[in-house]
Image (cartoon, rainbow, N blue to C red):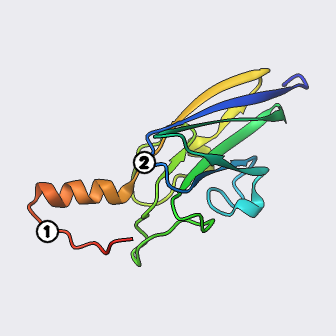
Amino acid sequence: MLALGSGDIELSLLGFRNPNGHALVSLFSGSEGFPDRVEKSVMTRTVKIDGNRARIRLGPLPWALYALSVLHDENDDGRMNSSWLGTPHEGFGFSGYPEYRFGQPGYDDVSFLLATEQLEMTIKMRYATGQQERRQQNLGIQLNRPQN
């Protein structure tokens, strides 16, 4: 059984491909709505990107099991932009460093226990479209992407 307490999460976000827009950081205390229904999150914060990184402190929070999802909202529209196939056009990241695979990780895959006064965590951003483009370039496929 956990003793009652509270703590802060010192979050470092690394690997943004550009400083456009903001990072949307959502903290969930259960699987309902995870990872993209921010209205179901405990909190969602907008963070300014500095070069290819960002930092934020979340807390104080009661000791509990949580999961984080991060969106690099490059166009500041408040949602993940994706292709008609569902491939994300914007960056994303999760607590727990899940292996990137098709589809979103589950809450149980990325949850962590906050049970100290301060927890430091790093999340590396991922870009599915960048991975897809590198694979296509390695195969010699010409890309014709519309300019933003």
Q: Position of residue 53 (x, y in %)?
A: 51, 38
Image quadrant occupied by the N terminus: top right
Q: Position of residue 123 (x, y in %)?
A: 53, 37
Q: Which residue is mark 2?
A: 126
**Disc number placed over residue 88 in the picture, else none:** none
Name above or below for residue 138 compared with residue 117: below
Q: Secondary structure at mark 2?
A: loop
Q: Please state which of the two labelled residues, at mark 1 or mark 2, is closer to the viewer.
A: 1
Q: Quadrant of residue 9?
A: top right
Badge 1: few (under 14), some or many (20 or more) residues near its Cα, within 10 Å?
few
**In the visual, does 62 lie left or right of 124?**
right
Name above or below for residue 94 compared with residue 122: below
Please tell me which residue lies in front, 98 or 133.
Answer: 133
Q: Amino acid at mark 1?
A: Gln
Q: Residue at x 20, y 56 (%)?
A: 135
**In the visual, does 15 lie left or right of 123?**
left
Q: Quadrant of residue 140?
A: bottom left
Q: Residue furthest left?
A: 140
Q: Amino acid at mark 2?
A: Arg
Task: Give whichever of discs 1 and 2 has the lower sequence position.
Answer: 2
Q: Residue at x 22, y 73 (%)?
A: 144
**Disc number placed over residue 142 in the picture, else none:** 1
